[in-house]
Image: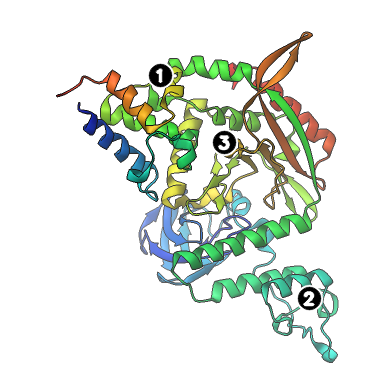
């Protein structure tokens, strides 16, 4: 028997509300097939099965709150009993898994009338209005740690009544983003490196390529950036990874998360799977589809669970450079600024060239600035050979 | 196709891209990008809509001629057979 779990949908999504079951007990299901729809603050997420088999039991009703890691249903999986597929392990809560209900003695943190709490946990609790006397500490001697407060915040979010208004939803989304980005800022020792890349060849190639394509199959320069960002990871694979508590876990496949603004504010960074392997045409098709679904508020769970690095491009909004915060547990974020004409020295002459500022935010626990610079150099090299993308 | 029909089609396509705005309130002589939060993906989707609805495949070289609504109407007016 296999558990059908509410997967981790990114650092800023801790819970959702079950909207509907798309399968019933007795129905067969294929791995990757959508079994349920869960509404989060950012989208209705189609939750896919990690297993092929037969649905045995549905454990939740539409309207129920679903914190990540919740067993939503059981599936009689094909093949071995209770086999847990490796992919499921990768997709479902790596760092968060240890935070799901675990057996631990409820040590009263307020023993002897004085709370034992780490200073950062105290600040975090104050920021979220958490009453520390109600928090069970998991540290030595019952000391309340940051993770305990985060759990309390998530649990409160999961247990709170779900206001349905758009303003409440926007507020909750900002709170979720705030929690994720505060965690990024607090836990990840960021470094930034930047390069200015001559885009003349890439743009000339794109213009020529687009004359051969009907309008519905044309490319935008953003897909060249995303593809190059993905391919450059082959040279610096330690950036295609997640930080798991105290070590880096390299990811075998490259799934670039592309930051897309949500209508009305906020953003989401769903994955384009196997970004380095697919053609520019396929990438464009997937990117367009993703943008349309983000704006319609419909995404798939694997798109939110699987990104191994994020690419954000803010140039069209006017930013010249981007120095982003990494989306945990990822260890890198690639930023692109505005495509603009600048004087550029070529063989001793000054020419007007289209250039773009490309930056990398790296997690210094996982990778160093030296390798970050190698990554940007590879990105530059790839964009000088656009026909190879 | 009459000018009025072209305008109606163009505004309909834009409305589909940005349902949150009232496209009839757009100023025809002001750059669209200054009035709408559109990026290159939206713009390409607009061109795909024009191709599908009006049968005009606009080449990339002509993109700079499409900055305002007035410019778009004029461009499409050139490309489409006029109707009295």
Q: How many marks?
A: 3
Residue A80 lies, in percent from the top left, at 53, 54
Mark 1: which secondary structure?
loop
C-alpha span from label 2 to label 3: 44 Å
Please check whether the numbered discs 2 and 1 fall on a single chain.
no
Q: Nearer the viewer, residue A190 or A62?
A: A190
Residue A316: mark in rendering:
3
The residue under label 1 is B59
The residue under label 2 is A144
The way the protein has been coloured in the rendering is rainbow
Q: Is residue A177 visible?
A: yes
Query: Which residue appears at 48% of the width and 30% of the height?
Result: A282
Q: Which chain is home to disc 3?
A: A
Q: Which chain is home to disc 1?
A: B
Q: How many residues crowd around disc 3 within 10 Å: few (fewer than 14), some, or many (20 or more)?
A: some
* Residue sitting at the far bottom: A112
Residue B13: mark in rendering:
none
């Amino acid at each position: 028997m296999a558990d059908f779990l509410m997967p981790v949908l990114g650092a800023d999504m801790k819970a959702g509300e079950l909207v509907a079951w798309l399968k019933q007990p007795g129905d067969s299901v294929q791995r990757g097939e959508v079994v349920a729809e869960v509404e989060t603050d950012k989208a209705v997420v189609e939750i896919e099965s990690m297993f092929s088999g037969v649905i045995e039991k549905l454990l939740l009703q539409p309207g129920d709150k679903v914190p990540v890691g919740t067993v939503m249903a059981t599936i009689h999986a094909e093949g071995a009993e209770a086999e847990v597929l490796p992919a499921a392990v990768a997709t479902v809560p790596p760092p968060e898994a240890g935070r799901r209900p675990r057996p631990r003695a409820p040590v009263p943190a307020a023993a002897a009338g004085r709370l034992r709490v780490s200073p950062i946990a105290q600040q975090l609790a104050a920021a979220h209005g958490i009453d520390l006397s109600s928090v069970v500490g998991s540290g030595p001697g019952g000391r309340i740690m940051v993770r305990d407060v985060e759990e309390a915040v998530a649990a409160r979010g999961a247990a709170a009544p779900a206001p349905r208004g758009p303003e409440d939803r926007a507020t909750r989304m900002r709170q979720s983003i705030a929690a994720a980005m505060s965690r990024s800022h607090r836990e990840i020792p960021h470094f930034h490196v930047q390069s200015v890349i001559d885009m003349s060849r890439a743009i000339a190639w794109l213009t020529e390529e687009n004359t051969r394509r009907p309008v519905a199959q044309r490319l935008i320069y953003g897909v060249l950036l995303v593809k190059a960002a993905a391919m450059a990871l082959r040279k610096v694979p330690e950036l295609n990874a997640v930080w798991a508590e105290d070590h880096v876990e390299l990811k075998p496949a490259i799934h670039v998360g592309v930051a897309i603004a949500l209508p009305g504010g906020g953003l989401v960074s769903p994955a384009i799977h196997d970004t380095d392997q697919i053609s520019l045409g396929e990438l464009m098709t997937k990117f367009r589809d993703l943008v349309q679904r983000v704006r319609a508020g419909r995404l798939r769970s694997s798109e939110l669970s699987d990104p191994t690095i994020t690419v954000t491009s803010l140039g069209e909004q006017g930013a010249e450079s981007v120095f982003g915060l990494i989306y945990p547990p990822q260890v890198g974020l690639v930023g692109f600024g505005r495509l603009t004409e600048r004087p550029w020295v070529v063989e001793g002459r000054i020419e007007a060239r289209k250039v773009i500022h490309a930056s990398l935010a790296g997690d210094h626990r996982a990778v160093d600035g030296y390798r970050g610079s190698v990554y940007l150099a590879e990105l530059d090299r790839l964009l000088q050979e656009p026909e190879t993308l | 196709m009459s000018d009025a029909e072209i305008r109606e089609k163009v505004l309909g396509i834009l409305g589909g891209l940005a349902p949150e705005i009232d496209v009839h309130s757009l100023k025809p002589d002001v750059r669209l990008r200054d009035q709408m939060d559109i990026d290159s993906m939206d713009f390409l989707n607009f061109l795909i809509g024009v191709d599908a609805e009006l049968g005009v495949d606009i080449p990339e070289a002509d993109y700079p001629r499409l900055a305002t609504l007035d410019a778009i109407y004029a461009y499409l007016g050139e490309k489409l057979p006029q109707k009295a």
